[in-house]
Image (cartoon, helix red, strand yellow):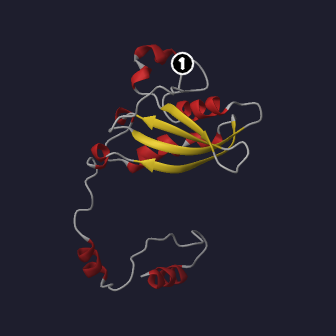
Amino acid sequence: LTYYTPDYETKDTDILAAFRVTPQPGVPPEEAGAAVAAESSTGTWTTVWTDGLTSLDRYKGRCYHIEPVAGEESQFIAYVAYPLDLFEEGSVTNLFTSIVGNVFGFKALRALRLEDLRIPPAYVKTFQGPPHGIQVERDKLNKYGRPLLGCTIKPKLGLSAKNYGRAVYECL
């Protein structure tokens, strides 16, 4: 399978990602972009026997365009298209684990950053959304006129029950 396909025409249903890639010395930008597309979709570092059980071409991510970043040496934007069939419907966790999970430790790259992501309406519609609106949440919390923020109390361990309760109360 080749993951660099400059002749690929994106579809309205594709999830499109733009990655800023800095390849390791000697790695061509097309190879770096293909590596990102592979690692974040159907590719693996070794041949596995299950590859023959399905047509991976249907599910693979495709690096369809590479362009240099103006004013930055050895940095490129790699554009990758992912088919919707690659993702679980209504799951942000699955979406981001697939696209930005394991790929950041890839050895062919010195640096990698997700710059932009286009999620098509066909995928957005698979999310149920909240069971009720913001007004119900504000009424439950009796909090109005300010943003509602979620947080993790730090430190996670070591606070007495009294101090933990105080920290939680201050967050409300």
Identify the residue at horizontal 55%, vertical 49% (top origin). 114
Q: Does residue 37 appear left or right of residue 111 in this picture?
A: left
Residue 65, x across and y down, in percent: 53, 35
Q: Which residue is mark 1?
A: 48
* Side of 80 where 140 appears, left or right: left
How would you rate the neighbour count of disc 1 (Cα within 10 Å): few for under 14, some for 14-19, many for 20 or more?
A: few
Q: Nearer the viewer, residue 166 or 16?
A: 16
Residue reaching furthest to the front: 70
Amino acid type of the residue tagged 1 in the rendering: Val
Q: Given the current orientation, which residue lies at the most extreme right position?
A: 25
Q: Residue at x 68, y 44 (%)?
A: 75
Identify the element where label 1 is drawn.
loop
Q: Is residue 57 above or below residue 26?
A: above
Find residue 121 and report its horizontal and vertical position in percent. 29, 47
Residue 141 lies, in percent from the top left, at: 31, 81
Q: Nearer the viewer, residue 85 or 76?
A: 76
In the image, residue 103 above or below residue 158: above
Q: Residue at x 55, y 33 (%)?
A: 39
Q: Quadrant of residue 60?
A: top left
Q: Quadrant of residue 68?
A: top right
